[in-house]
Image (cartoon, rainbow, N blue to C red):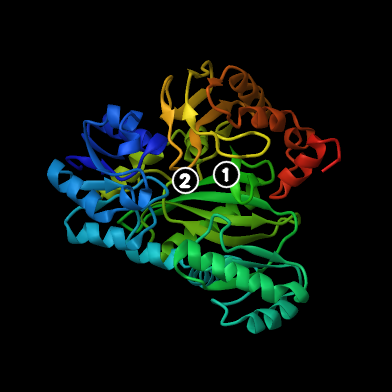
Amino acid sequence: MFKKILIANRGEIALRVIQACRELGIPTVAVCSTADRESLHVTYADEDVCIGPPPSSQSYLDIGSILSAAEITGADAVHPGYGFLAENAHFAEVLGECKLAWIGPPPEVIRLMGDKAQARRTAAAAGVPVLPGSAGPLASAEEALALARDVGYPVILKAAAGGGGRGMRIVRSGEELAAQFRTASAEAEKAFGDGSVYLEKYLEEPRHIEFQVFGDRHGGAIHLGERECSIQRRHQKLIEEAPSVALTPELRQRMGEASVRLCERVGYVNAGTIEYLLDRDGSFYFMEMNTRIQVEHPVTEMVTGVDLVKLQIAVAAGEPLGIRSGLSPRGHAIECRINAEDPVTFAPSPGRLQTFHLPGGPGVRVDTHGYEDYLIPPHYDSLVGKLIVHGRDRGEAIARMQRALDFFVVEGIKTSIPLHREILRDPEFRAGRLSTRFMEGFATRRTGGSS
């Protein structure tokens, strides 16, 4: 096992890794920007190193500063969390060259699955269903137009080098394709330094289902079931659940087996997530693979009893997985992302937490780096914490989430808590009638049909 782990991240995920390390008896090193000196991950780590000013390009994305922090503290492993450098193959390679262990998949796998077009081809070769579309990046708008005629509208253009909704455009006719192609390519170039885009058939009201996967260095590969991630705004997830009410045991088995096949084909090691679109007829299609731990990993932990971060560390240290694939989910879990933003306009709302009262009681978990009088900085994402509940079934989980949201008191900033309360009361949500377009219908219901 490792002697000391440096966490190359901030906020609640950095604190989550520290918690796992504390249970394993492994000392930790926190890195922070000057804006994060008062963050809880700095408080609870055994050591901390300031690595730069607030802009992430000068701190959390500064590979040289992170390597220096590891060297001066004697860390022998690095956990990247999610975001920042978590899916940076170059960073993983540099760590290897510096004899530092990387708690994540091999860099060549990160690079392969990070290229959306290559990942699509790899999935198809592994027998995983993929949406009709281009085999790789498109050379021109003319090529995209010709392919779209064959695939049939609507289609979606996606950045080959990244995700999160950037470089993504839905196209419903040939007349708008050329302009949307240029826009998607320019946005991809700005966001990822690569303007390559590819094209897929667009499904109108699919569910977004993702499977948690794990691989070890001994050839083992497993899945730990699915998460329902359909409730999104501009491709950013708001609420996640496990399991999905849309999956029958037979469909869960087929999707799980497809996920494991893909892991085995690429030699996957450590934690990963394979994301699918699930059509209304039960057909599922590979979308992408995230080569890291996910924001929503707690719902899987709640229904499986597996500590995914501790498993990440053990696998990175060379231990076999030691658990079987396809554990039957126990009960139902829901996660609400509590963001520092206006619940109506979604505008960011950084500021000082004047009151911060966390809910508790049976089946409630809160992952947060916030505390009373903590200043939420304006430099990073708006996630303040994650509220996770577990119940015997979905009905009890919804009731517990409603109770927990009512007992979650935040003053000094605006948060997404009121929005989550509304969603939990929505009849379509309660009935489990979800799709990636849920928020569009919810907005209409919310305003009485005036939007």
Q: Nearer the viewer, residue 135 or 414?
A: 414
Judge whether 190 appears above or below 62 on screen: below
> In the rendering, at what x and y percent does residue 406 appear?
62, 19
54 left or right, relative to 3: right
Amino acid type for the residue under numbered disc 2 = Gln
Mark on residue 436?
none
Picture quadrant where residue 137 is located: bottom right
The residue at which mark 1 appears reads as 227
| CA gap, disc 1 and disc 2 | 11 Å
The residue at which mark 2 appears reads as 294
What residue is shown at x 46% (from left), y 39% (from top)?
378
Amino acid type for the residue under numbered disc 1 = Arg
> In the rendering, at what x and y percent does residue 393 appear?
64, 29
Q: Nearer the viewer, residue 45 or 449?
A: 449
- Image quadrant holding the N terminus, namely top left
> In the rendering, at what x and y percent does residue 192 appear?
46, 64
